[in-house]
Image: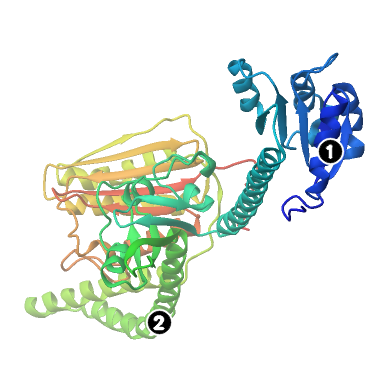
Amino acid sequence: MTLPLLKGRRLLVVDDDPMVLSTIRMMLQTSGTVCESAGGGREALQKLPHADPQMILLDYMMPEMTGVQVYQAIQNDAAYARFREVPVIMLTARTDNEEEQQQLLRMGLSAYLTKPFGYKELINVISNVFTLHDVRLQNEQLFREIREMKNYLQSIFDSITDAISVQDAAFRIQHYNAAAVSGRTDGNRRGSETGDLIHRLCYETYFSRRSICRGCPAVTTLQTGTPHGAEILTEDRRVFEVHTYPVRDDQQQIRYFIETFRDVTQKKRMEEHLYESSRLASIGTLAAGVAHEINNPLCIILGFAQSLLHEDLPDGVRKELEIIEQEASRCGKILDDLLTYAKASPSDKKPCRLHEVLNQCVVLTQQLARKKRTEILFTGPEDNPAVLADPVKMQQVFINLLINSVQAISQNGRIRMTLTYDRDKREAIVEVEDSGVGIAPSDLPRIFDPFFTTKAGAGTGLGLSICKSIIDEHHGAMHVESPAGGGTRVRVHLRLMDGKDDGHDR
């Protein structure tokens, strides 16, 4: 009787007993299989390529070459590599060598069939082996498709430049893309293939924190079940744009969420720089116009006041004229600062040794500091690399910073100016730190604003604005800090020269 499972299946039967071989072939042909036979092990190996069987029935005991030797040859010889997955049933009259049987089963042998056996027993064993083999092939195919789909999705996942991770409600990372590894802030950049981020905490891994970040959008997403976004500021002042999206299970419960983030620090700085440049350009244009319009009548007022002071006048009138002259001169100084700010002169950049410039700045401000019994200490290596800068403008910047520090100290203070170099970052760092009154936290964001000053009744509020514009022109950076205990620290970064610098901006 033809069986659907066996119909058309190709079998190779190997046995040295012609009668057994003929009987097995007869039983198999009635089941609908296509049967090829071999009278020994060597003949079986010769017939393998032509017969191309889907199953091999192999006699255990044969002269010259046993069934075990044939099976081992199929498993180990490269010439028969394509038949290694073909199911093999060992036909044997021996049942006492269990160790060898177990070894063959571990090698991949499909089953044993003990002689003598009948038609039903033979067909049942063959049917069961084919069923298991077909299921295994289907599973392997399914696993291949799943693996290919997973690799395909992972490649799409990894090609996204934003960092993406899937996290559970406890903020433990379950999956992530390649960008999430390179975006870590803990200094560890091992590849995503190591799986070293799985089950690690998001806020610890990405933001180097011991607790959930303030303003974390995932908190809102887990509470409301809606997407949310926010900006996260790290301890090292980097800004990350973070978005979270809920992932629901079959019961519509939120057990996971997707988090995407990108480092927008440079973008934010560029936006702030563009805004500041636009604002300062507008103020500069306005300042130049105002200075031009006021300068003429101011010169007239000052001229008349000075002319009248040469006359024989009562003391009261003379005192009032001196006040007029003094205030008119102060207005003139403000106008000079306005014009300097609004229309900066081009820089004459050249190789500049900062130690020499800074030392000269200290000498020029030393007398002013002595009046307040304030000591200026300058330290820095004399033998140092050069920066590409305008020495006159550098002197203007650091004299202004030293004067600010002196003015911030009432009496008996100390000012430290230090020069260091970061050769890895190719930059010189000048730090000016004083023991003065410091700057209020609310005032710190405004210190570079034109006309903003904390000096009551003195100063134009343009000094630091001019200093920052000079440093920006030299492609440097200026940072101001004021600790809670008092004092101010200004740090200026300037790039070192390299072989390509020729003194011209590009």
Q: Quadrant of the C terminus?
A: bottom right
Taking 284 as reference, is 235 above or below it? above
Using residue 177 as the reference point, say whether residue 199 is left or right of it: left
Question: Which percent across, then down, holds residue 238?
Answer: 38, 55
Look at 19% across and 54% down and name the residue there: 407
Q: Residue placed at 63% from the left, 17% from the top?
A: 100
Name the residue rendered at 88%, 38% in the picture.
Answer: 36
Residue 437 position within the rendered picture, expressed as x and y whole percent measured from the top left:
14, 52
- State the residue position of label 1: 25
Location of residue 281 with respect to 426 vertically, above or below: below
Q: Residue sitting at 32 percent across and 70 percent down? A: 450
Given residues 265 and 188, the one toward you in this image is 188
Q: Residues within 10 Å of mark 2 (few under 14, many from 20)?
A: some
Residue type indicated by callout 1: Arg
Distance CA(mark 1)–CA(mark 2): 106 Å
What is the quadrant of residue 132 in the picture? top right
Q: Nearer the viewer, residue 236 or 25?
A: 25
Find residue 147 and report its horizontal and vertical position in percent. Answer: 61, 50
Mark 1 falls on what kind of element?
Answer: helix
Residue to which mark 2 is pinned? 286
